[in-house]
Image: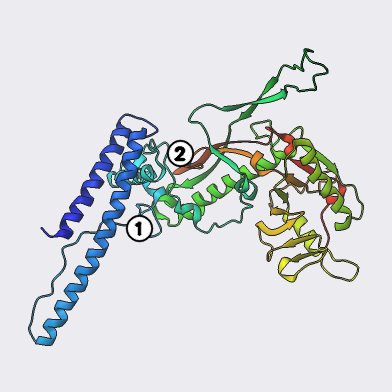
Amino acid sequence: MSYLDKVIEARDAVKVEMDAILEAVATENRTDLTEDETAKVDALVEESRSLDSKIEKFKAQADADAKATEARSAVAGIAMPKTTASTKITSEARTYSPENADVSFVKDAFTAKFSNDYAAQERLARHSREEEVERRSVGTGNFAGLVIPQYLVDLAAPLARAGRPTADFATNKMSLPPAGMTLNISRMTTGTSTAIQAAQNDAISNTNADDTLLTVDVRTIAGQQDISKQAIERGTGIDTFIIQDLIRGWHTTLDDQILNGSGSSGQMLGLSNTSGIGSVTYTDASPTVAELYPKLANAYQLVQTGAYMNPTHWVMHPRRLAFLLASVDSAGRPLVVPTLNGPMNAFATGAGQAYYGNSGYSLMGLPIVADANVTTVAGAGDNEDEIYCVTAPEFHLWEQAGSPFALNFDATGAGSLTIKSVVYGYAAATAGRYPAAFSKISGTGLVTPTF
């Protein structure tokens, strides 16, 4: 046995050992690895990577040696049979990936459940094992909760969506606990006190601390699509055009809820409706950037004086950012300019061309986040947007790990060969831990701008 064969054999042994650990966890119906199991899997992953590197190196050398031997034989005029190095393929594309275009996650999920397709079941099981190693979690191998291949999230969608710019910059992003539909946070509402002792032996200041409970509800975001059985069994591109669009829709809804949720009827309590945030009203029949500027400064100082924190970002609709970019002074010079132009007394500056989400521009030293999920139907005329001055570390967001990660198939339309596909996930968000760390500018001065 050659050295390369021994290395390949060692790599196979590592895979067998890793599979045994994960199979044991799945058999025990646990949702998490133990610390020892996690450490062991981590070590096995590192060992497999090291062995893969050696295999690639020695395989390349073996191929080079074979070519050299063939060249020498040709020069010498000796007819020698071509030699092939004894190798094994030890790395391959994931079960469901763009490289494996011949298999469909959606089709396999359907045929495995409704047609008892053994090959589809085997591919789904292999995909679940891949996800277990990647995510350090288990419990996704049953057909009622299948982990969607993440490459589907990255492919181009047929419908443009506003996405989740605000959700993505939130500093405190956490995973939801494994159970429960509420999260409880203690908020001190009455603090202790200190004061000067008037004279020696006099009683010193004493105030009993008190707190209240901040309850954050876990909300369900879901979407569904009826798909014909023919489309699943005979069609192509179902993964891209339906599942990926549902996923993008899920993230857009999450971002919209973080900003605009009412807190009732199953909605999150969004920033706009959170009690206790700073409020600035900008009333103006003919809005200008110059008149808006003092309102922005007011929103800024409300955070500092209300929560004793420094805000970190502005969040506004892209049309409001465009309103700033389009404004000029009396000489026709733009008020917001790129920093590379060496601006003097600029209203705001930008490191480059504005783009959706992280705009690249800053105002009063704070980055501007452009988010199309900011409402544009506020106010009596249903035509106002809002501007938020926010403190990102106080934006708390919990998402179920991997959300949206599940597909359910219910043959509710069996009589018409219709299958219902469902994407869902759980999330919770709050700005209520320190609501004064946020402020909102609203009013008639923020009606639809004209250009």
Q: Is residue 255 left or right of residue 291?
A: left
Residue 2 shows up from this direction: yes
**Residue beneath the point at 83% across and 43% down:** 379
Residue 71, horizontal then vertical, whole percent = 16, 81
Q: Which color scheme does this rendered protein use?
A: rainbow
Q: Which quadrant, please, contains the N terminus?
A: bottom left
Residue 202: horizontal and vertical position, in percent?
79, 13
The residue type indicated by label 1 comes to Asp
Please tell me the numbered disc located at residue 246: none
Mark pair 1, 2: CA separation: 22 Å
The image shows residue 172 at horizontal and vertical percentages of 59, 40
Residue at point 32%, 46% (across, down): 126
- Is 384 left or right of 146, judged from the image as shown? right
Name the mark on residue 408.
Answer: 2
Q: Amino acid at mark 2?
A: Asn
What's the residue at 54%, 51% (across, down)? 245
Q: Disc 1 designates what residue?
A: 102
Up-down: is 275 above or below 330? above
| Mark 1 surroundings within 10 Å by alpha-carbon count, few (fewer than 14), some (14 through 19), many (20 or more) | few
Circle 1 SS class:
loop
